[in-house]
Image (cartoon, rainbow, N blue to C red):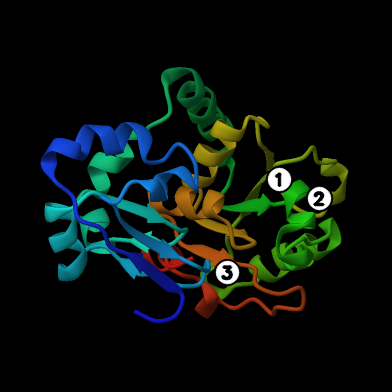
């Protein structure tokens, strides 16, 4: 499995299941006092572990498992149950009505709408600010997108949302749909667009999955955007 994955293996019996579930995760140190646990821990956020593999399924059927890490995946099951997942996570009526109204009032003005996820705030420190782009840099990205051949001769709108307040005067050279500013409604609004662009983020990744929308991750400041950079929703889930 590689050096990035740590296994700890202990015997377990059904009689101890409830005790383990109740107490084993109280603290990082406390859980190791219980010699009944099988733990699979991903040491880095770059390693992926497929829980559909036979070895994991066999363990899950016979032991209590604690999994610790960011990128445990099961794309086969996700694809099989994707519509049920979307149904479960449909926004409640309060949020849904607001964003549907916005779509009906504003999106219909355009042939296509590109969702622009502007990630500020916490991205100043995440990965040493690797994906913290200035508004001017987003404007350059947006300008490149509107010249994509797939949008030729189309009236293109941009649905702009951010985790911080935005001065829309910066976007005066673009036809902008103003988001409501509510993070749930912004997320659903992105899922209703025809394309989403933004820095690598699970926020826009979820919107792409939920709405079956292609997504283009802005990987570098100097990135020259092309249609070939557009990914389908399943490709975005590799992040």
Q: Are marks 2 and 1 in contact (CB under 8 Å)?
A: yes
Residue 7 place in picture, x, y as percent? 34, 67
Residue 160 place in picture, x, y as percent? 68, 46
Badge 3 local density, few (<14 within 10 Å), some, or many (20+)?
few
Residue 129 place in picture, x, y as percent? 78, 63
Q: Is residue 4 left or right of residue 78?
A: right
Q: Secondary structure at mark 2?
A: helix
Q: Is residue 73 left or right of residue 111?
A: left
In the rendered image, the vertical position of residue 79 relative to residue 87, given as above or below? below
Alpha carbon distance from label 2 to label 1: 7 Å
In the rendered image, the vertical position of residue 2 relative to residue 117, given as above or below? below
Residue that mark 1 sits on: 176
Q: Residue at x 13, y 36 (%)?
A: 15
> Mark 2 vs mark 1: which is more N-terminal?
2
Residue that mark 2 sits on: 171
Quadrant of the rendered image containing residue 218: bottom right
Q: Secondary structure at mark 1?
A: strand
Q: Foreground residue, 214 or 55?
A: 55
Quadrant of the rendered image containing residue 236: bottom left
Q: Secondary structure at mark 3?
A: loop
Quarter of the image where the N terminus is located:
bottom left
> Mark 3 vs mark 2: which is more N-terminal?
3
Q: Residue at x 70, y 52 (%)?
A: 119
Residue 111 seen: no
Residue 82 place in picture, x, y as percent? 26, 49
Which mark lies nearer to you, 3 or 1? 1
Q: Foreground residue, 31 or 225?
A: 31
């Amino acid at each position: 499995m590689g050096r990035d994955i740590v296994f700890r293996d202990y015997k377990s019996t059904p009689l101890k299941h409830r005790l383990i579930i109740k107490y084993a995760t109280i603290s990082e140190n406390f859980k190791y006092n219980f010699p009944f646990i099988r733990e699979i821990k991903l040491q880095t956020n770059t390693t992926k572990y497929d829980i559909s593999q036979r070895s994991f399924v066999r363990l899950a059927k016979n032991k209590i498992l604690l999994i610790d890490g960011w990128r445990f995946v099961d794309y086969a099951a996700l694809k099989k149950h994707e519509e049920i997942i979307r149904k479960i996570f449909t926004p409640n009526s309060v949020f849904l009505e607001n964003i549907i109204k916005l779509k009906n009032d504003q999106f219909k003005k355009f042939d296509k709408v590109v969702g622009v996820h502007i990630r500020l705030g916490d991205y100043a420190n995440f990965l040493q600010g690797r994906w913290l782009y200035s508004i001017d840099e987003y404007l350059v990205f947006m300008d490149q997108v509107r010249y994509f051949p797939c949008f030729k001769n189309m009236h293109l709108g941009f649905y702009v949302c951010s985790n911080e307040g935005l001065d829309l005067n910066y976007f005066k050279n673009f036809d902008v749909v103003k988001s409501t500013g509510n993070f749930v409604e912004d997320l659903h609004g992105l899922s209703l667009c025809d394309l989403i662009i933004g820095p690598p983020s699970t926020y826009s990744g979820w919107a792409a999955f939920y709405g079956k929308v292609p997504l283009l991750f802005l990987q570098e400041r100097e990135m020259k955007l092309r249609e070939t950079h557009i990914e389908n929703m399943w490709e975005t889930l590799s992040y």
